[in-house]
Image (cartoon, grey):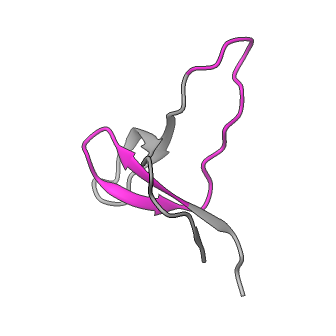
Amino acid sequence: MDLMERTVVRCADGHVFSTTSFPLQHLDAGRIGPGRLIRCPRCARLRHAVPVPGARREQG
């Protein structure tokens, strides 16, 4: 049974999906914001994605 936590995110094109990894790491001394570059499963492109506020995190 896979117990990885999933985060609901929205890509720059407005597609909403969940992802198993959404690293919140600092890059260099300054943080680049809450968004990350990940591949959107709807449009199959690398897109800037941010967590959806108020969305329920799932255990999958």
Helix, strand or loop: magenta stretch: loop
Asked if the magenta segment contains residue 27, the reply would be yes
Residue 10, above or below 31: below
Residue 1, above or below 47: below
Query: Which part of the image, by quadrant, shows the N terminus?
Result: bottom right
- In this rendered view, identify the residue nearer to me: 21 or 52: 52
In the picture provided, is 14 more to the left or to the right than 60?
Answer: left
In the picture provided, is 23 more to the left or to the right than 42?
Answer: right
Query: Image quadrant of residue 55?
Result: bottom left
In the rendered image, residue 33, in percent from the top left (x then y), is placed at 54, 24
In the picture provided, is 24 more to the left or to the right than 40?
Answer: right
Residue drawn at point x = 34 percent, y = 54 percent? 44
Query: Image quadrant of residue 3?
Result: bottom right
Query: Image quadrant of residue 58?
Result: bottom right
- What span is colored magenta in the figure? 7-32
In the rendered image, residue 11, in percent from the top left (x then y), is placed at 35, 44
Q: Residue furthest front?
A: 54
Query: Which part of the image, by quadrant, shows the C terminus?
Result: bottom right
Residue drawn at point x = 30 percent, y = 59 percent? 42
How many numbered markers are drawn? 0
Residue 57, above or below 45: below
Asked if the magenta segment contains residue 16, the reply would be yes
Residue drawn at point x = 39 percent, y = 39 percent? 47
Q: Residue furthest top?
A: 29
- In this rendered view, identify the residue nearer to me: 13 or 6: 6
In the rendered image, residue 20, in percent from the top left (x then y), is placed at 60, 62
Residue 59, above or below 13: below
- In this rendered view, identify the residue nearer to me: 12 or 45: 12
Residue drawn at point x = 44 percent, y = 51 percent? 9
